[in-house]
Every structure is written in structure tokens, then in C-alpha cells.
């Protein structure tokens, strides 16, 4: 393989897509990206390691092709993936990357760390993610880290698109039974899923191709209904409270100074739903946990590149 010691790779992998950037090792201040690549799901726990690895490989291939550079072993790579926040996943993916000849040094992290790296040059604060899943992850000035949430869709992921959609579907079916208050959610879900009668929702929801990601995509039904429906509004309010509590849970363990830390927001739910974002911030203010600065990170892969550069520089320092 060609040795490309002046390049680094940053990868951001989530439940539905994987993004890879090929960039120069040294940042010239322009944010120059040589090549970009995209592929399918990169969460090893949700999609499986083989699928996630194939997505990572494909995204990197595409980044090299986009840059018109032959693929080779770069100086450093940072693989920042949802479902890879624990040492077990990180070790397995690092071994795969080394065997693949990806980089001289490969660092694997969860998907929250690059969000802070992208949001602030000081690289400390709290990252709050709400997309298909949800998680809060923080680092203080001393480098101590902690996390809250991120337990997965079966026992956690409060405030996520999946949780919002599921709560909406439950409210709709309870309304159909007369066990809950009347709500626009019932007719809206029927229309969205092509269900002529409420009972037809069973067939639509439990069909083989109704994946977790497809259910999560139905969260937009809840947000649209929340503009005029009280039940949907309550679901959104609960999501905001849940997300704010994830952030608040990290303040004390990390001794973060209230009113000074950076809060970096990422994920489709927080990026696209301004009302929810504001409710989260209002809740943090009410609980005296407000941040000093709030940043929306639309390209977490930018932070992955930063972490790759840091890893490359650390190795160089150790070798001297």
C-alpha cells in the first residue's frame, strides 16, 4: 500500500449513515477537505460489526476516490461511531482497522467525543446527541469524562427520534381504544403509514421492513402534530425534560462550572427541531444547569478529523 503520511482520516458513523473525510495532517486554517465519502450504517452494535466495518470501508474508499488519491495507509484515523463507546467495541474495531492497514495509528471512540472537538478548540464541555438514539457525554478541563443515557432503544434512548415516535404510536393506539385522550396522532399516523383503520397500524408497524430507523423517522409526525395537539405537545415536552436531565446528570460528576461550559448539540432531532432545542435550554436554565455557550454541530466528522490530527501529533511527540 501507498504510505500517505501527510493525510488523516476522520469517520463519523451512526445508525443510518457513515461519513468519512480525508484531509491533510496539518490544518492550514482553511478547513480544506480533500475527499468525502458516505455509506450505510456504522453502528457496530445496532447494525452488527460486519455491516459497520463494511460501511466504514466503503466510506473511506469513496473519500479516497473523491480526492483522486490511491487508497493507502495514512498517518492517523479516528473512527467515531455510535455503539462504540466501550473498550470491547473499540478494541475489536481497532484490530480490524490495523489488519486493514488503515493508518499508522487508529483511534476508536463513541460518537459524542468528536462533537465536543468540533464545537470548541478547548475540547471540554458536554455533547448532547438526539438522533435515532440519544446520549450525553462530557469532558472537563482536567480530561475526566462521564456519560449519561446511551442505553439503547430497548432500555433507554429517551428524547430520541425512536422514543418520540414510539410514544406517539402508543398515544395513538390508546386513543383508538378509548384508554387515552383523543389525539390527532391517530389520524396522522394512519395517513403516514397508509392504514385505512386504526387496527391496520398493527400490520404496518410489525412488518419485516419496519426497522428501528424507520420507526425513528416517524418522529416527524409527533413534531408536526405538536403544533396543534396537546398530547403530542406533552410527548415533546417529556423528550425535552429527558434530554435536559442527561446534561444535568453530568454537571456534578465533572465539576463543570454552570454558565461557562460549552453545550454541543448534534443529531437530527436537535438539529432540525428548534422548538425542542429551546425547551431543552429552558429546562437547563430552570434547573440552574445552563451552559455558557451552545453550538449546533451539523458535521461531527469535522471533530473526528481533529481527533485524528491530535492522535498523529501525540505519536510524533512520543517518538521524539
Image: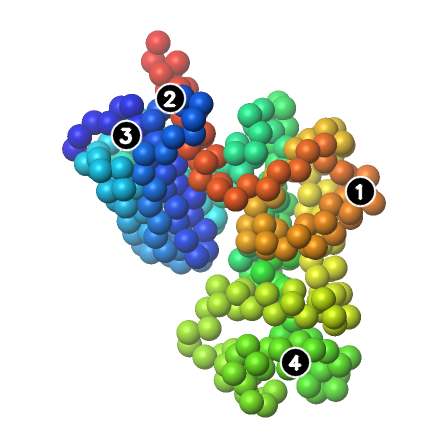
What residue is shown at x 36% (from left), y 55% (from top)?
Answer: 40
Is residue 130 something one can see in this rendering? no
Residue 24, horizontal then vertical, whole percent: 34, 27
Q: Quadrant of the N terminus?
A: top left
What residue is shown at x 58% (from left), y 50% (from top)?
Answer: 271
SS label for mark 1: helix
> Which residue was labeled with disc 3?
74
What residue is shown at x 58% (from left), y 24% (from top)?
Answer: 122
Q: Determine whether 76 is above or below 168 in the image.
A: above
Occupied quadrant, residue 240: bottom right
Please tell me whether mark 4 or mark 3 is closer to you in this view: 4
> Which residue was labeled with disc 1?
285
Residue 43, horizontal then vertical, whole percent: 43, 52
What residue is shown at x 39% (from left), y 49% (from top)?
Answer: 18
Q: Determine whether 134 is above or below 265 in the image.
A: below
> Which residue was labeled with disc 4?
186
Classify 10 Å Cα crowding around label 4: few (below 14), some (14-19), many (20 and above): many
Is residue 292 something one can see in this rendering? yes
Task: Answer with left or right where residue 161 lies relative to residue 314.
Answer: right
Classify 10 Å Cα crowding around label 2: few (below 14), some (14-19), many (20 and above): few
> Which residue was labeled with disc 2?
26
Classify 10 Å Cα crowding around label 3: few (below 14), some (14-19), many (20 and above): many
Amino acid at each position: 500500500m501507498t504510505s500517505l503520511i501527510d493525510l488523516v482520516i476522520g469517520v463519523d458513523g451512526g445508525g443510518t449513515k457513515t461519513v468519512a473525510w480525508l484531509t491533510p495532517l496539518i490544518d492550514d486554517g482553511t478547513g480544506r477537505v480533500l475527499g468525502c465519502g458516505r455509506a450505510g450504517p456504522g453502528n457496530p452494535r445496532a447494525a452488527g460489526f460486519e455491516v459497520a466495518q463494511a460501511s466504514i470501508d466503503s466510506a473511506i474508499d469513496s473519500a479516497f476516490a473523491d480526492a483522486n488519491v490511491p487508497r493507502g495507509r495514512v498517518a492517523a484515523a479516528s473512527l467515531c461511531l455510535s455503539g462504540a463507546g466501550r473498550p470491547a467495541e473499540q478494541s475489536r474495531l481497532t484490530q480490524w482497522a490495523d489488519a486493514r492497514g488503515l493508518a499508522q495509528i487508529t483511534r476508536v471512540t463513541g460518537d459524542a467525543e468528536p462533537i465536543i472537538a468540533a464545537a470548541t478548540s478547548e475540547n471540554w464541555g458536554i455533547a448532547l446527541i438526539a438522533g435515532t438514539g440519544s446520549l450525553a457525554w462530557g469532558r472537563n478541563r482536567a480530561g475526566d469524562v462521564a456519560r449519561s443515557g446511551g442505553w439503547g432503544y430497548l432500555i433507554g434512548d429517551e428524547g430520541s427520534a425512536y422514543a418520540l415516535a414510539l410514544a406517539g404510536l402508543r398515544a395513538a393506539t390508546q386513543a383508538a381504544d378509548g384508554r387515552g385522550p383523543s389525539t390527532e396522532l391517530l389520524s396522522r399516523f394512519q395517513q403516514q403509514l397508509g392504514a385505512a383503520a386504526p387496527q391496520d397500524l398493527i400490520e404496518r408497524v410489525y412488518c419485516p421492513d419496519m426497522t428501528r430507523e424507520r420507526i425513528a423517522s416517524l418522529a416527524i409526525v409527533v413534531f408536526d402534530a405538536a403544533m396543534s395537539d396537546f398530547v403530542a405537545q406533552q410527548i415533546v415536552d417529556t423528550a425535552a425534560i429527558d434530554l435536559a436531565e442527561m446534561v444535568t446528570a453530568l454537571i456534578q460528576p465533572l465539576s463543570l462550572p454552570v454558565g461557562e461550559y460549552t453545550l454541543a448539540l448534534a443529531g437530527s432531532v436537535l438539529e432540525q427541531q428548534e422548538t425542542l432545542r429551546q425547551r431543552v435550554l429552558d429546562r437547563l436554565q430552570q434547573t440552574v444547569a445552563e451552559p455558557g455557550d451552545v453550538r449546533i454541530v451539523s458535521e461531527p466528522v469535522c471533530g473526528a478529523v481533529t481527533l485524528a490530527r491530535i492522535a498523529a501529533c501525540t505519536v510524533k511527540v512520543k517518538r521524539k
